[in-house]
């Protein structure tokens, strides 16, 4: 006697699925269920798993499902069973089988539907990935340089052409056969930058187009060699100007203001205006290059973390970046967001205004932390102590410089939620008529016993109001908005 059951049900896309299960006559009801269950559990290791139809056979049981009716076909007879049990036990077994086998059939049908749905979802996802990566591959192929070309362009990576040592390897100046000058980053074998980071650098940065971002021209892969080819920015990085007593004199307020605004717009583009949302995670003076017209260009996206369009934060166990520029939640807990870049931007602005490094701000003979020094002087009404002496002689610019200090302190607040977005920062920088909220204490503040001197802040706001009235009298388009801004969201 063959113990089997068959049935059909409606599957995805209104497609009918037919299924049949069978056990040899010698099996009890429990043994039949165990056999069929064991067969189902072994499906993921079967080469037939995921096919449109399935005919699965075991010594004592088998099952089959198809998208067409096959019940007219006699299932293959299993090996001859021993004589069936007789008497009361036999009747009981038959009764149990009549109840259990249809139940197992329904379960198998449900499993079959689940397998088909899972297969379709995987196929759809694979097609999407292949579509995206197909574009990536074609883009990558168009960006790839021959290693011999790059080696010749850099004179075999000679020390004379070395521009500096980056976080992941040295950077060389090169000249391509067409006369174009380039900067070549030669990734170190022990840099810790894996394939994923390299792919981010090549495929993601290649999509970014903004006047305040360094443009990636291409890459080279040759054995263990991995090279990135960037546009050559002639004036080196901002730190070469800012922290050099002689070169810093070239940075008057007009140029520093342009650098601050350009960096803000570049980070805003990365956060909200580009096709992809990217958090830089290592914004600092040495990663801001200066072109021949003193325009800033943000560099080094090797440590950037890619986000989908609806994500704004993440968590990582791998801390990358530069201490002093890192937000506290990132440095201590690995939690990063767009507000992490806002914090780094605030530190950078304070460095640009003071002309000194955040970790070794010199106040006469003593060395202090820049954030603590800026916060203390802000509340004591002596924020002008923070300003680079080169800028102090700039008449009529005190208001603009003080406003930048105010914005920088808003960016470095310890509470992440209190920091403005880069969209808000850009608006603050461009619209002098907007009054600003009062900043709270910055992170890493070394003194806790200084209370805000509200009267001094009010005095600053009074000076701001007077300046705004003067600006209003000069332009009919100028208008004053007394409302404070905290978070702004781009359209």
Image (tube, rainbow, N blue to C red):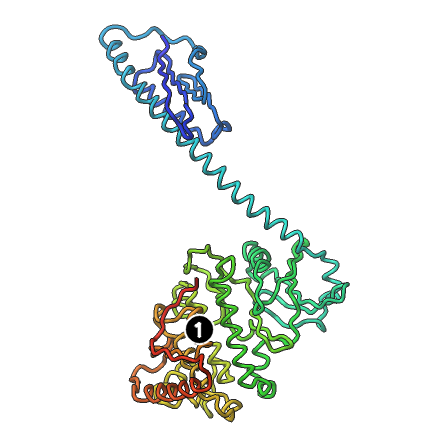
Q: Where is residue 41 drawn, in percent x and y?
A: 40, 29
Q: Where is residue 345 drawn, in percent x and y?
A: 47, 73
Which residue is found at the position 56% from the left and 78% from the top?
239
> 355 or 253: nearer the eye?
253
Q: Is residue 441 visible?
A: no
- Left or right relative to 336: residue 206: right
> 277 or 330: nearer the eye?
277
Q: Is residue 382 above or below residue 351?
A: below
- Left or right relative to 458: residue 231: right
Which residue is found at the position 49% from the left and 80% from the top?
351
- Total number of numbered discs in the rendering: 1
> 1 or 143: nearer the eye?
143
Which residue is found at the position 34% from the left and 77% from the top?
437
Quarter of the picture holding the C terminus: bottom left
Identify the image quadrant of residue 2: top left
Residue sticking out furthest to the front: 476
The residue identified by callout 1 is 427
Few, some or many residues within 10 Å of mark 1 (<14, 14–19, 20+)? some
Q: Secondary structure at mark 1?
A: helix
Q: Where is residue 73 drawn, in percent x and y?
A: 45, 11
- Left or right relative to 71: residue 224: right
Q: Is residue 222 above or below residue 28?
A: below
Quarter of the picture holding the N terminus: top left
Identify the image quadrant of residue 225: bottom right
Identify the image quadrant of residue 194: bottom right
Q: Is residue 112 above or below residue 274?
A: above
Q: Is residue 375 visible?
A: yes
Q: Is residue 25 above or below residue 53?
A: above
């Amino acid at each position: 006697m063959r113990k089997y059951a068959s049935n059909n049900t409606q599957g995805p896309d209104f497609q009918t699925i037919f299924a049949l299960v069978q056990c040899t006559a010698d099996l009890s009801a429990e043994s039949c269920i165990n056999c069929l269950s064991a067969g189902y559990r072994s499906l993921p290791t079967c080469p037939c798993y995921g096919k449109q139809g399935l005919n699965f056979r075991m010594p004592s049981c088998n099952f089959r499902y198809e998208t067409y009716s096959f019940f007219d076909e006699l299932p293959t007879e299993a090996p001859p069973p021993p004589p069936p049990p007789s008497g009361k036990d036999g009747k009981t077994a038959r009764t149990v089988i009549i109840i259990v086998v249809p139940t197992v059939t329904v379960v198998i049908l449900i499993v079959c539907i689940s397998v088909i749905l899972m297969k379709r979802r995987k196929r759809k996802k694979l097609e999407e990935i292949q579509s995206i990566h197909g574009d990536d591959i074609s883009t990558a192929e168009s960006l790839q340089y021959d290693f011999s070309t790059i080696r010749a362009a850099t004179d075999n990576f000679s020390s004379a052409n070395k521009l500096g040592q980056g976080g992941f390897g040295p950077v060389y100046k090169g000249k391509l056969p067409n006369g174009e000058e380039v900067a070549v980053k030669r990734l170190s074998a022990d840099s810790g930058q894996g394939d994923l980071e390299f792919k981010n650098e090549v495929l993601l940065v290649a999509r970014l187009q903004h006047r305040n971002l360094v443009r990636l021209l291409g890459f080279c892969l040759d054995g263990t060699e991995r090279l990135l080819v960037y546009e050559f920015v002639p004036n080196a990085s901002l730190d070469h100007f800012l922290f050099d007593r002689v070169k810093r004199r070239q940075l008057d307020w007009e140029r520093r203001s342009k650098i601050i605004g350009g960096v803000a717009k570049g980070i805003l583009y990365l956060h909200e205006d580009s096709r992809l949302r990217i958090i830089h995670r290592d914004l600092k003076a040495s990663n801001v290059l200066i072109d021949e017209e003193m325009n800033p260009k943000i560099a080094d996206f090797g440590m950037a973390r890619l986000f989908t369009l609806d994500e704004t934060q993440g968590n990582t166990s791998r801390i990358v970046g530069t201490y002093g520029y890192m937000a506290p939640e990132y440095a201590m807990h690995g939690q990063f967001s767009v507000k992490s870049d806002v914090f780094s931007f605030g530190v950078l602005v304070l460095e640009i205004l003071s002309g000194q490094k955040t970790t070794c701000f010199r106040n006469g003979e003593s060395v202090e932390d820049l954030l603590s020094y800026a916060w203390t002087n802000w509340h004591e009404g002596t924020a002008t102590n923070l300003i680079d002496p080169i800028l102090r002689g700039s008449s009529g610019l005190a208001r603009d410089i003080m406003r930048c200090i105010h914005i920088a302190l808003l960016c470095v607040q310890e509470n992440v939620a209190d920091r403005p977005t880069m969209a808000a920062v850009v608006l603050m920088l461009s619209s002098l008529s907007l009054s600003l909220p009062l900043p709270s204490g910055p992170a890493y503040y070394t003194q806790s016993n200084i209370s805000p001197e509200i009267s001094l802040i009010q005095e600053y706001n009074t000076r701001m109001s007077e300046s705004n009235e003067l600006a209003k009298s000069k332009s009919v388009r100028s208008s004053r908005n007394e409302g404070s801004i905290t978070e702004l969201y781009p359209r």
